[in-house]
Amino acid sequence: MLNINSLSRHYGKKEILKDISFSVKPGEIVGLVGENGAGKSTMLKILATLLHPTDGSIALNNLTYKENRKKVRKLVGFVPQDIALWDEFTVEENMVFFEKLAWKKKSKEELKQLCLDMKLEIWQDSVKTLSGGMKRKLNLAITLIHDPLLLLLDEPTVGIDLKSRKEIGSYLYRRAKKEGMMILYTSHDMDEIISLCDRVFCIGNDPFYQEVLQESGKEVFKL
Amino acid sequence: MKYIIETRFLHWKRHWPSLLFWLLIPLIATIGIAKAANAVTDDSKVPVGIVMEDESDAASELRNEIKSTPFIRVYQLEEDVALYRLKKHQLDSVFVIHDGYEEEIREGSRNRLLTSYRSDLSFAYTPVKEMILSYIQQETGRSKAAYTVQELIGHYQSTKQWTWDEIVAKSKEIQSEQDLLKTSFSFGDTENSSQNNDAQLFHIWGLWAIFSLLSTLLLFDWIIHEKHASVNVRFAFMRYSFKHYLVFNFIIYTVLCFIVDLLSVSIFSIIFQEQISIWSLTSFRLTLSIAAFLMANLFRRQFLYYTTAFAIALIMAVASGAIIPNTGMIQKWPWVDMLNPLQPFLSGGSANLATCIIMLFSIIWYFRKEEIHA
């Protein structure tokens, strides 16, 4: 369970996040939407322990972020907006490289299966030659090597074709529902958010996203 | 550490030709340049012809004495060939050692032992002639001394009888052991670094140090590539922080370079009979690797880093005293020597002010607060 209590973040005098509180249950997929600059990426970075909140507290499975940063990091997976891969490596080498440095050990067969589950069927090809969709899948697969309890995705499907987007979405849904993985997801694609997320949080003051989502009948919360 | 080594091998798999090239360049370049310089020096020696009419030991010793003189190349020829080559100016001068040379020396005679020839272009004739004359004078003096010793033995009716040959042999032995007069040229503060009698145009370790400096700087370019890679963010969720990943890789590179350094020491010992203290080499390698590591951490663009690396190597080649002697500059500004990171290695020591500064910066780098991925 992820609990966020009265979370705030300031950049100098500018207040990005103000008094945010919510919780995420195991197996739940939560969407974060809002206009550019609303604080979605800041929120994910705080939850990924990459940024400190100015105020408030966060706890993952009763482990508070402030006191248990290192332990929390073992349970968190963060998929950055930019593709974070070694371009000159093959798919296999990328997977092996990050497995060697990961908290959890996996065999080469397990790593290959992880890619296959995501419909990433090329193993020996160089990352340079992969399509945008393939790169995004590999970007996600690497994050999942250590089987995180909380998966944070910052616009993971931006700029990729519909087929790859659907494949990534259905894979994440399976992982969440089968293994109880908590997923927080930011995207500008409302269709994707509506079809995938159990709950959606709107960050920022623009009512546009809230209106669009309410029309779809989705449970929407204002942060 | 095992896992970091395995990840490093994944990188090396792609770049092994350049890795091997930069690891071996100090060794290969030093041998290449030193050998080429020696070959040039050999070609620039003055060609002198020797005609041996006398095949005695004394005549051979004279020939070997001339041969051992630096900057003279000796050709042993028949007289007609030697004179023909002198006419063609292929030889600077010709010296004929006449039959009976040894007998004449034994009798203490210094007249008509040799005949010398020169051409109108002979520029080294006089110094070579003077050198031969001084040698002959030394040998006739030795012979006379031997006869005098024998006379004294007879005069004082000593029980121990010495032959002329024994006295001369003993005299030569004392001369070689006691080395009454010795002149040697060496780099500043390097009087104990080499016992090599073969004159090297370049200071082998100085040359090697400059190439090592350049190759180490270029080998550490992986830091710029990996520090600014997008994958950096992933290290927050890994077993090792990015800082520890960098430190472990620094150790891997330093050990790898040190192995190649030891290989270089062995090869230089065989080829050039050059030796160096292992402590000095270890200190040099550590200083160089830390300096390269810290410097690479300051750069974002590889091209700028490469340019700076070549500029530093060039400045060190000119100012450090590794290749060109910098005694004049050190006399004028003694602090330059203290800030020269190559100075401890070139002088056979282990540390100076520059080493301490580099170590201090490395400690600051390690303990400073990380700005990213807090």
Image (spheres, rainbow, N blue to C red):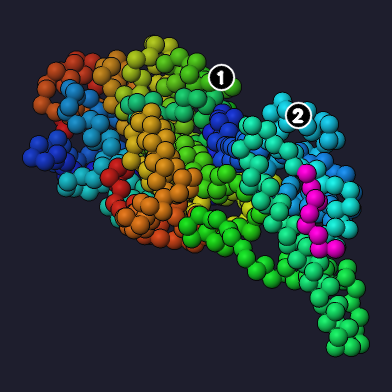
- Assess whether residue B101 is covered by the magenta stretch: no
Report the Cα–Cα distance between label 2 and label 1: 70 Å
Q: Secondary structure at mark 1?
A: loop
**Foreground pick, B281 / B64:** B64
Q: Quadrant of the C terminus of chain A?
A: top left
Q: Residues within 10 Å of mark 1 (few under 14, many from 20)?
A: some
What residue sits right under mark 1 in the picture? A125
In the displayed structure, B348 sits above or below A177; it is: below
Res A93 → quadrant: top right
Q: Residue furthest left?
A: A13
Q: On what subunit does the disc labeled 1 rest?
A: A
What residue is shown at x 55% (from left), y 44% (from top)? B202
Q: Quadrant of the N terminus of chain A?
A: top left
In the displayed structure, A29 sits above or below B151; it is: above
**Foreground pick, B32 / B234:** B32
In the displayed structure, does residue A194 sit left or right of residue A143?
left
Which residues fall within the magenta stretch?
A: B107-115
What residue sits right under mark 2 in the picture? B85
What residue is shown at x 47% (from left), y 39% (from top)? B214
The amino acid pointed to by label 2 is: Arg
The main secondary structure of the magenta stretch is loop
